[in-house]
Image (cartoon, rainbow, N blue to C red):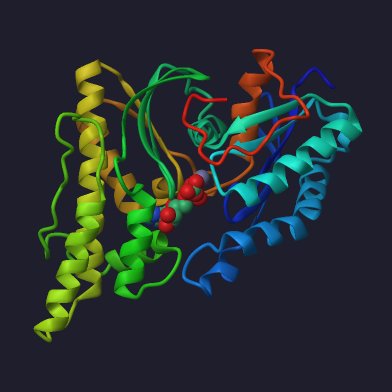
Amino acid sequence: MNGHTDILAIETSCDETAAAVIRDGREVLSNVIYTQIAMHTTYGGVVPELASRAHIEKINAVVRAALSDAKMALPDVDAVAVTNGPGLVGALLVGVAEAKAIAWAAQKPLIGVNHIEGHIAANYLAHPELVPPYLGLVVSGGHTHLAVVRDYASFEILGRTVDDAAGEAFDKVARAVGLGYPGGPKIDAAAKEGNAEAIAFPRAKVNGSEYDFSFSGLKSAVLNYLNHAEMTHEEVNRADLAASFQKAVVDVLVGHTMRAAKELGIGAVAVSGGVSANSALRAGFEEACGKAGVKLYLPPLIYCTDNAAMIGAAAYHEYLSGRRSGYDLNAVPGLKLGER
Ligand code: KG4
Ligand code: ZN
């Protein structure tokens, strides 16, 4: 309401209760994240019921903090955006109900946002020069997608995982090795002390679809390695195992993406999602893109894992295109990339 478009965005799809105010799809006026990680750590993973309850407890305070950090009140914002899928249904519902109530009370437009599209939009927050078309790789706890981002809300999916998501593989392997939850950061840290060439883990290919991913075979190979070591009473070097597993994931993610960039003649790659925080993945992409002369975009760490700023960035383009959600907006746990 000041010549700018300021969107209040809400995200509660998994284990972060988050709200943000985003100006013109690019500028972060506030970004508040309450993470439930400490609570879920006790159980070795996200407990959906506990997540929903914690969202309910925190959501009002988080939204208030996002407005006050942005030095705004509700009447100042132009729209209310919320992740309505994919994610945990009970968790999503908390954000959706909150956003609907706020939008109705303040008489503001309501915009439901696809969480995966939010991850893709994370790079817009830090890179003003990034505009479609480009090649987008989303790697998170629930998703692994390689897509041509034709326009802000137009995606051509080249490949996806046929089993586990990349982050899921990190979490499962970390649990098996006894590194705890969330697995990604733990493996990342352990791998720094290890030798990535120590153990030869498979780089899985998916028959007939060169851009699809498969990580369950790699996970099984790690479990077999651990079982074998236990049976033969050999000691497992956890740092070597973490580094070798991580390298196998990174090789496949970077390999598929660079092949697509070359074959499709696309000169820009943007990586996002929780796993894009991984230091080996970032280094792997920097090296490969440097060699290939491809421009690389990575989000700052705070926009890699779940946040509402990226939801506000994605919502801006929906807002511009005139798309609005009704008060019947619902949580859609299985929402696919490109679906609304
Ligand atoms: O994007 P995100 O916060 O939530 C989903 O939408 O899924 O991603 C969380 C995932 C978890 O699987 C976590 O282990 C992984 O991202 N992750 C990492 C790192 N930091 C978070 N994986 C590898 N290395 C990291 N440094
Ligand atoms: Zn996410």
Can residue 129 be seen in the rendering of this structure? Answer: yes
Residue 39 drawn above or below residue 282: below
The structure residue drawn at horizontal position 78% and vertical position 47%, both measured from the top left corner, is: 63
Q: Position of residue 67 (x, y in %)?
A: 81, 42
Q: Position of residue 133 (x, y in %)?
A: 41, 16
Asked whether, in this view, residue 124 is left or right of residue 135, the answer is right
Residue 323 drawn above or below residue 197: above
Residue 215 drawn above or below residue 272: below
Q: Position of residue 89 (x, y in %)?
A: 60, 47
Q: Position of residue 284 (x, y in %)?
A: 26, 44
Between 223 and 28, the one lying in front of the other is 223
The structure residue drawn at horizontal position 76% and vertical position 42%, both measured from the top left corner, is: 97
The structure residue drawn at horizontal position 35% and vertical position 62%, both measured from the top left corner, is: 172
The structure residue drawn at horizontal position 28% and vertical position 64%, both measured from the top left corner, is: 191
Can residue 304 be seen in the rendering of this structure? Answer: no
Q: Residue furthest top?
A: 321
Could you say which quadrant of the image residue 314 lies in? top right
Quarter of the picture containing the N terminus is: top right
Could you say which quadrant of the image residue 25 lies in? top right
